[in-house]
Image: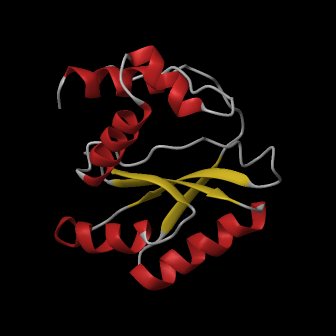
Amino acid sequence: MDEIDRKIINTLQTGFPLSEEPYAEVADQLGVSEKDLLNRLSGLLENKVLTRFGPMYDAQKLGGAFSLVAVRVPEGDFHRIAEIVNSYPEVAHNYQRDHDFNMWYVLATETPEKINEVNYDIEQRTGLKVFNMPKLDEYYIGLQLPV
């Protein structure tokens, strides 16, 4: 990753213009062409430097729900279980922790009922009990990860 890629990542974490030509605006701000910006974004995604680039929607305001889920996964089976969990489009992100509950994932669903449906299906496919912890309140912390 070069300095321009770093600037792209840092800039896009702080906002994305709502306009007819948002990429052109960002490219101009960074001093690159729109085509170069789009090529670099594609490369960062293809090389897995970025796993996702896109808007974040508030599923709850759209009638859906969020939930945090924990699972105790046998260490030797972690990657197999992760593939199953990650196969659901409702899984926003999934990560490993150094704890008895070593897998944690976030669900964002179109309806509140879908949380239980997805978790039930994951339990059936993995044979593991999932511990659902629905969101009660939301706090904005302005997370940015400068590179």
**Position of residue 39 measured from the top left corner of the image (x, y, whole percent):** 33, 43
The answer to which image quadrant residue 10 occupies is top left
Residue drawn at x 34%, y 35% is: 36
**Position of residue 47 measured from the top left corner of the image (x, y, whole percent):** 22, 50
Q: Nearer the viewer, residue 92 or 23?
A: 23
In the displayed structure, would residue 24 be above or below residue 47? above
Residue drawn at x 44%, y 72% is: 87
In the displayed structure, would residue 88 be above or below residue 22? below
Please give left or right for residue 92 compared with residue 64 in the image.
left
Question: How many numbered tags mark residues here?
Answer: 0
**Position of residue 1 measured from the top left corner of the image (x, y, whole percent):** 17, 32
**Position of residue 103 measured from the top left corner of the image (x, y, whole percent):** 36, 56
Look at the image and name its color scheme: secondary structure
In the displayed structure, would residue 92 be above or below residue 16? below
The answer to which image quadrant residue 5 occupies is top left
Q: Nearer the viewer, residue 49 or 67?
A: 49
Residue drawn at x 25%, y 66% is: 78
Residue drawn at x 71%, y 42% is: 58
Residue 147 visible: no
The answer to which image quadrant residue 84 occupies is bottom left
Residue 19 visible: yes
Q: Nearer the viewer, residue 27 or 142?
A: 27
Q: Looking at the rendering, in which quadrant would you find the C terminus?
A: top left
In the displayed structure, would residue 102 be above or below residue 23? below
Q: Nearer the viewer, residue 134 or 18?
A: 18
Please give left or right for residue 139 compared with residue 25 in the image.
right
Please give left or right for residue 120 compared with residue 34 in the image.
right
Please give left or right for residue 85 compared with residue 112 in the image.
left
